[in-house]
Amino acid sequence: MAGLRIYVPGDAAAVACGADGIAKAIPPLAAKRKVAVEIVRNGSRGMHWLEPMLEVVTDKGRIAYGPVEMDDLESVFDAMIAGGAAHKLRVGVPEEHPFLKKQTRLTFARCGIVDPHSLDEYLAHDGYKGLMKALADPAGIVAAVTESGLRGRGGAGFPTGIKWKTVADAQADRKYIVCNADEGDSGTFADRMIMEGDPFVLIEGMTIAGIAVGATRGYVYIRSEYPHAIAVMNDAIRTAKNAGYLGRSVAGSAFAFDIEVRVGAGAYVCGEETALLESLEGRRGQVRAKPPLPAHKGLFGKPTVINNVLSLASVPVIMDRGAAYYKNFGVGRSRGTMPIQLAGNLKYGGLFETAFGITLGELVDDIGGGTFTGRPVKAVQVGGPLGAYFPRALFDTPFDYEAFAGRDGLIGHAGVVVFDDTADMAKQARFAMEFCAVESCGKCTPCRIGSTRGVETIDRIVEGVEPEKNLAVLTDLCNTMKFGSLCALGGFTPYPVMSALTHFPEDFVPAPQKQAAE
Amino acid sequence: MAYEAWSADTAANIIRSHEGREGALLPILHDIQEAFGYVPEPAEPMIAEALSLSRAEVHGVVTFYHDFRREPAGRHVLKVCRAEACQAAGGDVLAARCEKHLGVAFGETSLDGRVTLEPVYCLGLCSVSPAAMLDGRIVGRLDEKKIDKLMAETA
Ligand SMILES: Cc1cc2nc3c(=O)[nH]c(=O)nc-3n(C[C@H](O)[C@H](O)[C@H](O)COP(=O)(O)O)c2cc1C
Ligand code: FES
């Protein structure tokens, strides 16, 4: 009998729940039973409440078990040996699980399925097909990406094709592709999952971008909080180089392209594109005034495409299956699919990729299963620390750039963070201001000073000090920050603050006992 | 974690290994910190000279980024996520518990040099929150028992 093939995710979410220990404990169990095993550290399928979710290859396909803790490992292992037999933790065939079955996985097609360290597996699962089509018609790449309707997944939602065209049209001796893998938003982890679970798709996307605009060098700027992603990306880049997919001649073509990983240093604002470029150049991560756009004068003053991980990782499937195929998913001006991240106080947290248009309520109640504390959902913050808090009353909002904007919110990088009814929205508003104060790059006053004043003002409101006057001050401050800040850090902090105030005014009323104490 | 004591030779070697690299400052600082556990002040003029920067520029970069330390951390570094998804999952209570049990505030090192407690704003583990990182090892689904175990490891 050939060895048993067992998948134990190496994704950080699985590792944080004990996957490394599980992977180490399997060989001794196998030795005791005299069975040969091969352990593959795959990415995560995205059903994070089941992590560590182990899978065994059987003649019925892959059978999953999870969440597997050390105490259950031995019995799970025996069920695996028995051909994927019954067990209280048996999930069954992952693809049949409703959480995965309801998804449309284009960007995440391979994540959790393939071995992220294996280029052969990548190729066997349609990897580099997009690049081959791109190489067959390099001049057509920008048009295809534009036609697909792909918009930046990093937050601003700018059409990717238009950005690429600007850089393609720019004249310069050198151009750059920069991948923004700073993923600082709380509630988001899709970039991390792709880098850890399917790194070659990002490499392929960046390579196609390079060919499209005439850039020969790429950087992936990864936040330092992601050591696992950094390791997998470095490994994959090395493999791609050795196999001739990166280097002086990409896949035997006349195009050269190389990629290097650079590591951030714990500054949220470095996710802002111009601050990121400053950081890459070796400076403080201070936001640059625009214009000039990075597309004209970016890294080291050269025309630069800067895109989020998911934007770039969506390009290979667009090139492979065609722009029309991708564009067919979605609604309105939000085309294709979005890898939505379900997080916080949610029963079924994880990654849910689906066409735009699904409602917030479906995501939170149906897919996410409500809170794990079993208490009612009070608020949902969508789009990271700069995103608005939505009450249940707005659960009919479809996941769509314009629909969220129309309700004074944003989808940002598509993180959905759920809070139950114990949440204090004044505290959340205060945190938003505090976070802005801590992370402000300091270049513009509305952001730097406004946020500090914001914290003080909210404190006064909840203490009951001239609440009406201070509420007016807070609203005023938010306006100043919104319209006077250099970038969206100061500019969007008013979203969480004002949404908390608008939808949950009762939380800003001072507690009676506090008043009595005064 | 064991780090080397300050050595100008080691620093010079690190700096030299980045020669010719575009935008080498952050990679150099990361390597310096990995070697010594912090960015010793005498490294700053050396880096400045190698990169043709002013000392003030290098210093400005070191102080801008939360990651770079200007003095050695405790023997253990416990980073607890303080961001929204972890707050939503009960992280604030655990964070307060850390301060109380370790006897330090966030951003501080215990007097005996045993542990540094730091806030971190998201570890990308928001679906298995609350989360923390002890000496580079990540742990999710924290509850009181788990966080107590982590703290015990710093003893
Ligand atoms: C404070 C701040 C933080 C940001 N953080 C990120 C980030 O972590 N990742 C990201 O892709 N974009 C981030 N952005 C958005 C980028 O500025 C930029 O819009 C994006 O990298 C463009 O790529 P895209 O068009 O593919 O989305 C941030 C913006 C601001 C203002
Ligand atoms: S918010 Fe704590 S890990 Fe993301």
Image (tube, helix red, strand yellow):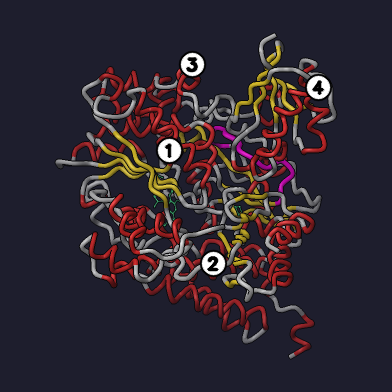
Q: Give how far across and how far down residue B6 sits, in percent.
A: 41, 65
Whether tag 1 and tag 4 are in contact, CB under 8 A, the answer is: no
Contact, CB < 8 Å: mark 1 with mark 3? no
Q: How far apart are marks 4 and 2 (CA)?
A: 46 Å
Residue type indicated by callout 2: Ala
Q: Is mark 2 on a helix, strand or loop?
A: loop
Q: Does the magenta stretch include residue A354?
A: yes
| Sequence order check, earlier mark of 1 and 4 | 4
- Residue A234: mark in rendering: 1
On the image, numbered disc 4 is attached to which residue?
A: A79
Q: Residue at x 75, y 54 (%)?
A: B146
Q: Name the residue under label 3.
A: A124
Question: Residue A268 in the image: x percent, y percent?
Answer: 46, 59
Residue A301 at x, y = what percent? 21, 52
Q: Of label 3 and label 4, which has the lower sequence position?
A: 4
Q: Distance between the residues labelled 2 and 1?
A: 28 Å
Judge depth for marks 1 and 3 and give the one in front. 1
Find the magenta span and give its range.
Answer: A345-357
